[in-house]
Amino acid sequence: MTLETKSGYQLDESSEDISTNPTGSTPFKEVAAAQLSRRRLLQGSLAVAATSFFLPASVYAKGMGKSLAPGQNRGPLLNFAPLTIKDATAAGGKTITISPDYEYQVLIPWGTPINPDSGIAPYEGDPGSRPTSAEQEQMIGIGHDGMWFFPSNLPDVLATEVRRGSELPAQARRRVLSSSSGMLCVNHEYGTNPHLLGKASPESLEDVRLSQAAHGVSVVAIGRDWRGKWDVVPSALSRRITGNTEVTFSGPVAGSPLLENPIGNTPQGTLNNCGSGPTPWGTYLTCEENFNGYFGSSDASIGGFDALQDEAYGRYGFSRFGFGYSWHVYDERFDLKNGNYANESNRFGWIVEIDPFDGAQTPVKRTALGRFKHEAAAVKELEDGRIAVYMGDDQRGDYCYKYESNEPWRKSIAAGMSPLDDGKLYVARFDQGSNGNDGQGTGVWIELTSANSAIANAGLDTQDKVLTYARLAADAVGATPMDRPEWSTIGKEGEVYWTLTNNDRKDDGQGELSEANPIFENTDGYIIATTDTSETTFTWNLFLLARNTRSPDDPKTAIDSQDLSFANYQAPADEGANVFTDPDAAFADPFGRLFIGTDGGQPDGLQDQLVVFDTNTGEYRRLLMGVNSDEITGLAPTPDFGTLFTNTQHPGDGDPKATNFPAKTDGVTIPRDATIVIRRKDGGIVGS
């Protein structure tokens, strides 16, 4: 998530854009020389590797339906007319544009009641009013981001498989799982004060409560009628999880003094929920990213209660004014100078597990997965039944992480335990390979444990400290700084793919040039793939440079003298007709199509967009383009792949002069984040 917005419609999120990593760790610096051909970049490693973006293979196998049988993944996959640059820009960014072979529907925009029988009137963008905090607690929030669709009969299917002792056949599973009703979990990452409150700063505790109520997660029941239209349906399972919802902690940090405040307040809230991931056992993982921005100080300084925490404040980007929310002015638990709440900030920055089929469940923060700016979580089942979770820390110059459970997940679940509570956390060090000149290499997963003398010598002498201050532990062992690791996902053969959205601040010391980060001023981003060769080692390859989708006459294709030579620009075959940059959200279907949602300034007058790849050939086409200043994020299919849900986040940055989406253009109505339901007009597979 990046904010580069119009004056009056932005937060001071400089803490996100500016690296807080002081280490300058660069495990390898040798310059690579060989060129990689476009076929190697787009048809080779991409075609082989990217077939399971976003969706863990284990989820297909255990929760959402396996891949197709052999022979069903052949032939051309992209048979839709691409959305051209001319057609995409014709609407001037006021409304969403889509391929002529497709149609879309707007679903659950900000302000939609989560239960249609609640009697609460929807908020539809009236600039002269806003919901009350009490109303917002029963409405869809703002800042739609990561999401997942859980078929309404998924619990029954999973229970049936447990009883029969084996999984249903792949095609049977896809037919059995409902594609017309289910629970949709949607993250609500953030909302600016002008957008959400209609003012630059809160003026009361009620204003703060409204903002807090618009954050978090929506768990909402949806269904499709016989005409194909989706809508919210009544359900006791629908609920909002907000900045004030009671939560609990599990794992090694649960019960630690690091989570206790002198005032003894109950843990509450989840904030800045960015990416997400489903688990094989049918739950939803939501990731807390830029949590630091909600805290501020009533004094010119911050902290002062504990030396280690003061160090961590700087490393996690806390500041006196945060991102400008000013919650601390009216809600003292967000005041970094209030000793009664000395450890409140340690209660955020975790991955939170939510059961979409239990409306009374208390969300659980899983501390074994570490505390940092989590972007997403990709879960993979290992050969021995244990699970691994791959997570990026979304900031310039930060790291890639992995968690592995100690026990098989089925054994843990059967014993009433969570596989996310007992395991090891690792951080990645990327090394170059023996050739050192081809954008491929090896790497090491370094365990983050207080038994490591380098970590203990950094003041992290107990495991609760290691996990709570995971960034400091990763610094101590020489992890590789990366160009904003965002979404992670698992390929068919267990490969892991990481989207690196951008980093054009290396000249300011925010990150290091290396073979795994080969572009000096990396404005366009890229994707890297890793394959574990053991629990602690992996291989990696760089296989997609977004700069290579630009037209040859684009000035941004110029090569910086400091770029590594194998990363030099390669002109695309389509001459840039389907250009995209800043890859972020990603999802691959089992047919070989890869969907990428972008987050960043796009070339040629385009807004952020959704692009589809045929991973067998490297061909890619533009399917959808968003509205002015939005982000296309969150991707979730129905089991039959006839419907794809995605989101437009912060349309117009909340400025009604930029867009009024989803309302008709009038220059007045406040734009609202919304889920976009995508379907082929002929009812076929989405992306085909």
Image: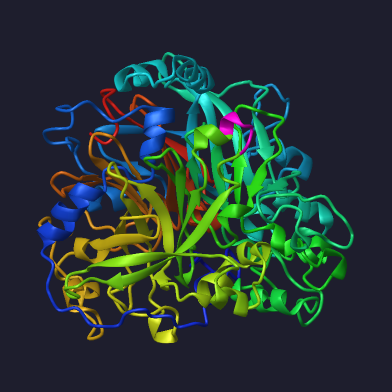
Which quarter of the rendered picture does the C terminus lie within?
A: top left
Indicate the position of residue 398 as horizontal and vertical percent values: 47, 70
127, 188: nearer the viewer? 188
Indicate the position of residue 682 as horizontal and vertical percent values: 25, 23
Magenta stretch, main secondary structure class: loop
Q: Quadrant of residue 237?
A: top right
Q: Is residue 23 left or right of residue 73?
A: right
Which residue is pictured at 56% across the width and 76% down the height?
A: 453
Q: Is residue 389 left or right of residue 609?
A: right
Which residue is pictured at 49% across the width and 22% down the height?
A: 158
The magenta-colored residue range is: 413-417
Tell whether position 645 is magenta.
no
Q: Is residue 540 above or below residue 320?
A: above
448, 378: nearer the viewer? 448
Which residue is pictured at 64% across the width and 21% down the height?
A: 235
Q: Is residue 580 above or below residue 7?
A: above
Indicate the position of residue 134 as horizontal and vertical percent values: 78, 40
Indicate the position of residue 386 as horizontal and vertical percent values: 46, 42
Q: Is residue 480 above or below residue 31?
A: above
Q: Residue furthest right?
A: 263
Q: Quadrant of residue 175?
A: top left
Evaluate whether residue 656 shows in this view: no
Evaluate whether residue 293 shows in this view: yes
